[in-house]
């Protein structure tokens, strides 16, 4: 079974609109971390936001927020006020366990296209 | 603070040739990862180092791939001999172990095997 599922291969949004990128995960470990990364066409993976499994509040970083629904095992990324520069591939990833130095498991990604 | 450095950025080789990639992590980061990202997929871990020791190489095709991190700082990943299916982007990442273990990635090396 896939550990990280991103069901939207592509999403299209207009500038200044909000967009939600879906992510569901599967783990039996009570301690885990969820990450979102952005990968522009240049190829570098850029860290956006993190949510720990024990965090009570949803994480926010500027225009990014993570809608964490633990019971549903979902960790959707919300981008408010989209900008043209947000056009990129977005990956959801999970680290299982409490140790920080554990490798990430990535989903297949969602391509976001922002138009003017 | 300098980010993760990788070289070369691009490499084109013929099958059965050998190739090596280099990575220099962020200063002070003890954990280093090599990921393989095939076109249209998310990155997949190849090998993880903690200082100069291997933590996880369970997904490394050891008959053709090798990696080392001799002094616990920079690392090299080698493929010998390369196959067509090795065409991918090879990403290096590092983490300090703090900051929730966020992994910081380099720009990657795009390998094309002809």
Image: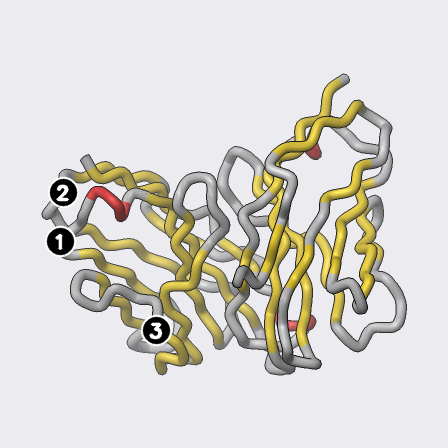
Residue farthest toward the front in the current orientation of the protein: A1
Distance from the alpha carbon under mark 2 to that under mark 3: 24 Å
Q: Are marks 1 and 2 in contact (CB under 8 Å)?
A: yes
Q: Position of residue A34 (x, y in %)?
A: 68, 64
Q: Position of residue A40 (x, y in %)?
A: 57, 37
Task: Report the number of discs.
Answer: 3
Residue farthest toward the top in the current orientation of the protein: A116
Q: Chain of mark 3?
A: B
Distance from the alpha carbon under mark 1 to that under mark 2: 7 Å
Residue that badge 3 annotates: B58
Badge 2 marks a residue whose secondary structure is loop
The residue drawn where x is 25% and y is 64% is B61
Crowd rating for badge 2 (residues with CA inside 10 Å; few <14, some 14–19, many 20+): some
The residue drawn where x is 54% and y is 65% is A104
Q: Nearer the viewer, mark 2 or mark 3?
A: 3
Query: Mark 3 or mark 2, which is nearer the start of the sequence?
Result: 2
Residue A94 vertical placement versus A87 (above, below) = below
């Amino acid at each position: 079974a896939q550990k990280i599922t991103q069901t939207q291969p592509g999403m299209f949004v207009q500038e200044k609109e909000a967009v939600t990128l879906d992510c569901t995960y599967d783990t039996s470990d009570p301690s885990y971390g969820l990450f979102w990364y952005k990968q522009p066409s240049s190829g570098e993976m850029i860290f956006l936001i993190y949510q720990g499994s024990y965090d009570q509040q949803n994480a926010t970083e500027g225009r990014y927020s993570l809608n964490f629904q633990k019971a549903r095992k979902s960790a959707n990324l919300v981008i408010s006020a989209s900008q043209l520069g947000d056009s990129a591939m977005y990956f959801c990833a999970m680290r299982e366990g409490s140790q920080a130095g554990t490798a990430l498991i990535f989903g297949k990604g969602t391509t976001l296209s922002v138009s003017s | 603070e300098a980010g993760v450095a990788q070289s070369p950025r691009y490499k084109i080789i013929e099958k059965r040739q050998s190739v090596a990639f280099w990575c220099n992590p962020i200063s002070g980061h003890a954990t280093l990862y090599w990921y393989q990202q095939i076109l249209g997929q998310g990155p997949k871990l190849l090998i993880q180092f903690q200082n100069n020791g291997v933590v996880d190489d369970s997904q490394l095709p050891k008959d053709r791939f090798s990696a080392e991190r001799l002094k616990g700082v920079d690392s090299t990943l080698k493929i010998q001999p390369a196959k067509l299916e090795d065409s991918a982007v090879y990403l290096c990442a590092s983490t300090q172990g703090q900051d929730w273990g966020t992994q910081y990635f380099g720009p990657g090396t795009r390998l094309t095997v002809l």
